[in-house]
Image (tube, grey):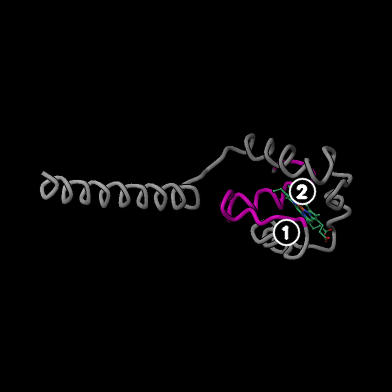
Amino acid sequence: MGVYVMPILRNSLVILITTLALAGTYSVSAENATSSRSPHALEQMVRQDCGSCHGLTFKGGLGSPLLPESLAAYSVEDLTTIILDGLPGTAMPPWRAIVTPDEATWMARYLKTGEPE
Ligand code: HEC
């Protein structure tokens, strides 16, 4: 009996583990590649997720102010990089796994202008 059960069990485990690994890979790459949030969703995200640290009106909290005048020294490219990679060694987290580069650029423009394009 055991002679017949063990290979089946082993195969099932291999299939299970492969499925889990593929599912994990798929969801991560799907998030990176295909996420396309609407401007409204992105605006909500900036206000809520970024606002939780930077202040709901971006005047600063745990994080520094994110008002257009506070960010004048940064280009849209600089801000996009900060959003994607965070600021290592600080509480500013990287968002690369959550937003696409295009979405980060949208957020950077949004912050620079204080309103959606
Ligand atoms: C967990 C808290 C936290 C969250 C969430 C967060 N930040 Fe930050 N962020 C910080 C902190 C703290 C700093 C200041 C780091 C330092 O220089 O000491 C910072 C710095 C920044 C800076 C640089 C500002 C400057 O004047 O140098 C930008 C731009 C920025 N964050 C944008 C964002 C955006 C956009 C989001 C949302 C996608 C976000 N942050 C979410 C904590 C956070």
For residue 39, side relative to residue 25 (left or right): right
Q: Which residue is mark 2?
A: 111
Q: Toward which corner of the image does residue 76 lie, by quadrant?
A: bottom right
- Badge 2 local density, few (<14 within 10 Å), some, or many (20+)? many
Q: Start and end of the magenta stretch?
A: 91-116
Q: Residue at x 86, y 53 (%)?
A: 64
How many badges with numbers are in the image? Answer: 2
Q: Toward which corner of the image does residue 114 lie, by quadrant?
A: top right
SS assignment at label 2: helix
Gap in angstroms between the C-alphas marked 1 and 2: 9 Å
- Is 78 situated above or below 117? below
Quadrant that contains the N terminus? top left
- Is 34 situated above or below 86? above
Q: Residue at x 69, y 38 (%)?
A: 43
Q: Which residue is mark 1?
A: 79
Q: Residue at x 36, y 47 (%)?
A: 20
Judge whether residue 49 is colored magenta: no
Mark 2 C-beta to ligand 1 under 8 Å: yes
What is the x, y in percent for residue 79? 73, 59
Mark 1 C-beta to ligand 1 under 8 Å: yes
Q: Residue furthest front?
A: 1
Q: Disc 1 vs disc 2: Cβ atoms closer than 8 Å?
A: yes
What is the x, y in percent for residue 54? 82, 46
For residue 25, side relative to residue 62 (left or right): left
Quadrant that contains the C terminus? top right
- Is 38 situated above or below 83? above
For residue 36, side relative to residue 64 (left or right): left
What is the x, y in percent for residue 4? 10, 47
Q: Amino acid at mark 2?
A: Leu
Q: Toward which corner of the image does residue 116 lie, by quadrant?
A: top right
Q: Amino acid at mark 1?
A: Leu
